[in-house]
Image (cartoon, coloured by chain):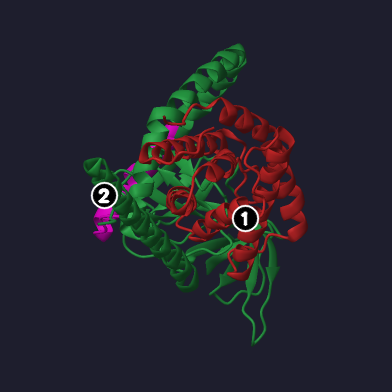
Amino acid sequence: MKTRMTDSYLFKCFVAVFVCFIVDSTMSYFLPFNYTKTGITIVPCIGLMMFTMLVKTIEGAERYFFAAICGVYYSIVYSNSLAIYILIYLLIAFVRSYIFKLDSLSLLESSMFCIVTILAQEVVIYWLMWITNMTRYPILSFLTMRVLPTLLVNLVLSFLVYWVYNNMKIEVE
Amino acid sequence: MKIRGDILYKDHKSGKKHNKRIIWVTIVLVLFSIITLLTSRSASSIEIIFKDTVANIEYYLIKAPIQYVGNLFHEYTEMKDVYEENEKLKKMLETFTRESANNEILTSELNDLKELTEIDYLPTDYNVKYTKVITRDAESWNNEVTIDLGSHDDIKEGMAVISAQGMIGTITNVNELSSTVSLLSSENPKNQLPVMILSGDQEYYGLLNRYDLASKSYRITLLSDVEMLEKDAKVFTSGYGGVGKSPRGILIGTVNDFTLGDGTTESVCSVKPSADFNSLNYIAVVQRVNGE
């Protein structure tokens, strides 16, 4: 994928991530859901995985701009204005740029990176909910009923995201 | 060559300006995020309107057509059971006729009593408006759902929302075409709900504080002096939430535990929810008749 920066490219990246957010929302709408947290909870993270793939292809200041806008959009539309997502998305952009900075990833590398990112996000949000007294969800239930099923489902979805990313023609000449 | 050089210089200059703008926007968003986290700010009206607009577009363009097709398949598979269901319904119809006649007599008596006592409305009088859940909290931490009724349909904050089995939540935010429902299964609800417990011949009053994950039940603080509560005593809304709020008599659940308070602690009971929170696609908003 070419990394030449133009507004058109950035716009296409935004569209790709926002479409993935819609897929996430639609999937979670039809997945079995349990508001009393007594059963399994699965959170599809296709948007987040696509974001982790695309963020490295954007250069310079636009990379963090892309991360911040994706975080703002997700927090307003899907998470009741929980602004921590802006920081999480910026942190992912930073990690992808300076720590895990491979230009192209193999299927295994990309899946592992996506899973670790989702795990980190889930843990950070749980910790935030716990310290603000929003939940008393026991940690063992959180790990077995929410984190584990979410990671397993997203591991399968990460293969699909990798395939879509590699077949996506959003570069501009 | 000079002209081309000028153009390149201008491009470089505008590119720098563009980059500066982007950096500023990013810094502002980061500061906004940090301030929001530190001050625990709730969503502004612009954010709510934007969220509800996206939710409506997503629902009517994507989720509703998928749901429609899914329902068609579901109905087709259910066709097999129609004969058996019809037989059962025929038997029930005989009882229904008797109950219906009895209901008419009671309604007529109630109207006579209303005229005698010059009461226009009872706290138990209400209408329901059926609705659908159009979006759920994707991260599932807030216990909120969005429904496709708003101020256009005379929905107001504080109205009760019910499923077929009982009350499930209250309206906490109203927009033109959609509203947010805070579910009773929230561990940290925005408001307390006034409730009434029918134990034997006695009526007791209390406040539903929150949902307790460990006991899988609501925690109710009792306001009345209570010595003992029957197990499985029914809990209803008391109708004392104020004008336009939930009416009296909507089922919330049944008592499964009671702890008598002493001088320093209050009496509390835990209540098993009557509603099934696993299936919330079709619900109704309760509009109190005198709720102007």
Displayed quadrant of residue A18: top left
State the residue in front, A47 or B251. A47
Spot occupied by residue B232 in the image (x, y as percentages of width and height): 66, 55
Quarter of the image containing the N terminus of chain B? top left
Q: Residue at x 50, y 23 (%)?
A: B93
- What's under tag 2, amino acid-wise? Lys
Q: Main secondary structure of the magenta part?
A: helix
Q: Residue at x 36, y 53 (%)?
A: B48
Farthest residue in the left direction?
B3
Spot occupied by residue B174 in the image (x, y as percentages of width and height): 33, 52
Q: Is residue A75 above or below residue A46?
A: below
For numbered disc 1, what is the local secondary structure? helix
Left or right of B175 in this view: B124: right
Bounds of the magenta segment: B100-121
What is the chain letter for disc 1?
A: A
- What's under tag 1, amino acid-wise? Tyr
| Badge 2 vs badge 1, beta-carbon distance below 8 Å | no
What is the chain letter for disc 2?
A: B
Tally of marks: 2
Displayed quadrant of residue A54: top right
Left or right of B93 in this view: A115: right
Q: Is residue B45 visible?
A: yes
Q: Which residue is mark 2?
A: B10
What is chain B's hue in the picture?
green
For numbered disc 2, what is the local secondary structure? helix
Left or right of B157 in this view: A65: right
Chain with red colouring = A
Residue B68 sits inside the magenta stretch:
no
State the residue in front, B93 or A53. A53
Residue A98, numbered circle: 1
